[in-house]
Image (cartoon, grey):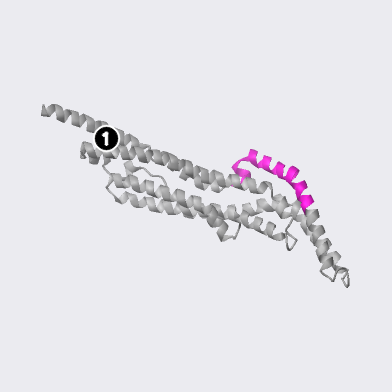
Amino acid sequence: MQSIFDAITEWLKGLLVEGIMGNLGGLFTGVNEQVGEIAAQVGMTPAAWNAGVFSMIRQLSETVILPIAGLVLTFVMTYELIQMLIDHNNLHNFDTWIFFKWIFKTFVAVLLVTNTWNIVMGVFDVTQSVVNQSAGVIISDTSIDVTTVITDIEAKLDAMSVGGLLGLWFQSLFVGLTMKALSICIMLVVYGRMIEIYLVTSVAPIPMATMVNHEWGSMGQNYLKSLLALGFQAFLILVCVGIYAVLIQTIAATDDISGAIWACMGYTVLLCFTLFKTGSLAKSVFSAH
C-alpha cells in the first residue's frame, strides 16, 4: 500500500515539476521581447517609425492645418499691429519705424509657419541623436530566464514536497498571466509615445503661428517645450530600462525559486510604473503643460 502511495506521489511530483518548468520557461518571454525592442523603438525618428503614418500626418498638417494657421497668423499679426499703434498714446506721437518692426515680425512669423514641419522634425532629430548616443551606454542585457538564473533548478524542484510544488505551480501560473499583462503595458507606453508625437506634430502650424506675439506667444513656446519633452522622454525610458537591467542581474545570487519569480515580477512592475511616469516627468522638467 505504501509503495502505491509513493508511486502516486512521485508521479504527481514529476507532473508538477514538468508543469513548473514549462511555466518558468516561457514566463518572461513576452516581457523580454518588449523590453528588448524598447531601445530600437524609442531610437527611431517619426519618419523612420512608420513611413505610412508619417506621410499621412505630414499631408494633413500641410493641407488641412496650414491654411488654418494662416488665418490664425493673420489675426495675430493684425492684433500685433493694433497693439503697436495704441501703445503710442492712441495714434499720437508714434514713430514710423514701428511699421518696419511689424513687417519684420510678420516676415519671421510667415517663415516659421511655412517651415514648421522642418523645425519640428529638427527638434526630434536632435533629441533622437541624444537617445541613440546614450543607448550604447545605458542598455545592457535585460532578458530574464529563471531556469538559467537558478542553478540545478530541476534538482531543487525534485527535492520539494508535493504541497510546495503545488504552491509553486500556482505562483508560476499567476505570475505568468501578470507578466503577459505587463508586456502589453510596456508596448502601450512605447507605442503610445510615438502616436502622441504624431498627434502633436499634426497641428504644429497653429501654435507656431503665435510665436512672435507677446501675449499669444506662450502658446507656441509651450508647444516647443512639449516637443522637447516628448523627445527627451525617450532618454528617460532608456534610463529606466538601464536601471531595470542592473536590478534583474542581482536575482542570479538567489537560490529561492519562489523568491526569484516574485522578484522578477516586482522589478517588471517597477519598470512599467516608471515608464508610465516618464511622460509627466519629462513635461515637468521642460515646464510643458
In the image, 73 versus 28, the foreground residue is: 73
Residue pushed farthest bottom?
93
Q: Is residue 151 left or right of residue 54?
A: left
What's the residue at 50%, 50% (across, down)? Answer: 276
Q: Quadrant of residue 56?
A: top right
Q: Which residues are magenta?
A: 44-72
- Looking at numbered disc 1 in the image, what kind of residue is underneath it? Val
Q: Is residue 220 left or right of residue 30?
A: right
Is residue 127 within the magenta segment? no
Main secondary structure found in the magenta portion: helix
In the image, 115 versus 258, the foreground residue is: 258
What's the residue at 25%, 38% (across, down)? Answer: 165
Q: Is residue 286 left or right of residue 21?
A: right
Work out whether residue 162 can be spotted.
Answer: yes
Residue 96 in the image, given as x and y percentages of width and height: 88, 68
Residue pushed farthest left?
1
Q: Quadrant of residue 97?
A: bottom right
Residue 204 in the image, given as x and y percentages of width and height: 69, 50
| Quarter occupied by the C terminus | bottom right
Is residue 61 within the magenta segment? yes
Residue pushed farthest front?
90
What's the residue at 82%, 66% (across, down)? Answer: 84
Q: Secondary structure at mark 1?
A: helix
| Quarter occupied by the N terminus | top left
Say above or below: 146 vs 86: above
Give the residue at mark 1: 17
Work out whether residue 132 can be spotted.
Answer: no
Say above or below: 42 vs 21: below
